[in-house]
Amino acid sequence: MFYRELGNTGLRVSEIGLGAEHLEGLPSAEVSAVICRALEAGINIIDVFMSEPQVRSHIGAALGSRRRCVVLQGHIGAAWLNGQYTRTRDPALCRTFFEDWLTRLNTDYADIGMLHYIDSEDDFDRVFHGEVLRYALHLKQNGTIRALGMSSHNPAVARKAVETGVLDVLLFSINPAYDLMPADAALDALFAPESYQAPGLHGIDPARALLYQTCLSRGVGITVMKPLAAGTLLSAQTSPFGRALTPAQCIHYALTRPAVASVLVGCRTPQEVDAAAAYESASDTQRDYSSVLGSAPLFSMQGRCMYCNHCLPCPAHIDIAAVGKYLDMALLHDGQAPASAAEHYRLLPSHASDCIECRSCERNCPFGVKVVERMHKAREIFGM
Ligand code: SF4
Ligand code: SF4
């Protein structure tokens, strides 16, 4: 495993990290198997954004005395209310749930404390000019968090935050589909360093390129979420490039952006950890993504579900990401859900048929997904 400096934090992190969100809902033994395999592979950074309590307890138990061997990213502003994830800017709730995060992970510090999921200007203003940032800075001052970070999907808002000078780390969604401008960029320009120098940007979305460059110049390390675009890039049918990329190609793409220190891959099984860690032994040819991106047609990821559940809470208690995942599986099979997907769908506590069409999810979704339309489709396919 190769390790990289995480900006100016003084932390050295494995270039492949673990995104723990897929561990939610697994029994303790299975969580432990994934954590152990990750540590064996040399992975030393884990993002634990989930507010669901049990999974955090399982991760804490799995780490045990090895807690100090890993860099843990915890989130300030992710809360668990009425049995669901929710994003909060209430200072008291931020405090309660961050303390709970520490308790369940059986630790008294987070290596990185993330201001959780700030995508809009309004939210940026609320957090950065209010109690939540003051609380986070207080945590940093007293050593409860070692570095201050922020998670975001919005390059303009993220850059604004980086330019305040208070952030050490940015957790940002990076993959080739999010990054590249349509069509008119020549391949050489897409990957040449000068492509990242404003104002002559082309190929990479200018706002994103500028963000990465700003992080690099300010010593803010980037950890990457959604490197595989929730698996969308791994299938020719769903890849906006019309061809499938491999995990190694996606990981390599993210690792070759400026300021990126670690790519956090979501894994649910030890085998998935092995597949992610296999990047380390992949050849240059296996990592090379240029042939796929070089033939990219016009595309957009807008409207595609990334299964992130940032749209919660849902008043009908629907796990929107899970419904979306099973729906997409069925759509990949011409609307015929594989038996396993249909069964998993049936076992969900709430279904598309429970949707009351309040559309709060559509307002919260960073990807402009038409959730209600998709709920109709899921109900049609699964019959509930
Ligand atoms: S609808 Fe949007 S917010 Fe919800 S899971 Fe899908 S991409 Fe994430
Ligand atoms: S529109 Fe439906 S799925 Fe979305 S939050 Fe409302 S009830 Fe939940």
Image: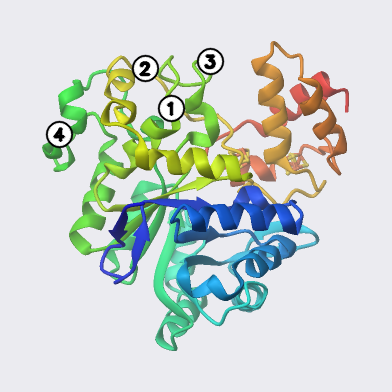
Which residue is identified by label 1? 246
Seen from the viewer's position, the closer of residues 357 and 15 is 15
Q: What residue type is labelled 3?
A: Gln
| Number of the front mark, 4 or 1 | 1
Q: Nearer the viewer, mark 1 or mark 3?
A: 1
The three-letter code of the residue at mark 4 reads: Ala
Q: Which of marks 4 and 1 is nearer the N terminus?
A: 4
Q: Is mark 2 within 8 Å of ligand 1?
A: no
Q: Under tag 3, what secondary structure?
A: loop
**Identity of the amino acid at label 1?**
Thr
Asked if residue 366 shows in the view, the reply is no
- The quarter of the picture where residue 182 lies is top left
Tell me the CA gap for discs 1 and 3: 14 Å
Image coords of residue 314 (percent x, y): 75, 48
Q: Where is residue 59? Give x, y as percent.
A: 64, 63
Q: Name the residue under label 4.
A: 192
Q: Is mark 1 on a helix, strand or loop?
A: loop
Q: How crowded is mark 1: few (under 14 residues within 10 Å), some or many (20 or more)?
A: some
Disc 4/disc 1 C-alpha distance (Å): 22 Å
First-in-chain label (1 vs 2): 1
**Badge 4 or badge 2: first in the primary sequence:** 4
Q: Are marks 4 and 2 in contact (CB under 8 Å)?
A: no
Please report contact status of discs 1 and 3: CB closer than 8 Å, yes or no. Answer: no
Name, please, the residue furthest toward the bottom.
Answer: 142
- How busy is the neighbourhood of tag 2: few (under 14 within 10 Å), some, or many (20 plus)? few
Q: Which mark is residue 237?
A: 3
> Which residue is denoted by mark 2 in the rendering?
298
- Which is more N-terminal, label 3 or label 1? 3
Mark 4 is surrounded, within 10 Å at the Cα level, by few (under 14), some (14 to 19) or many (20 or more) other residues, namely: few
Q: Which amino acid does label 2 sit on?
A: Leu
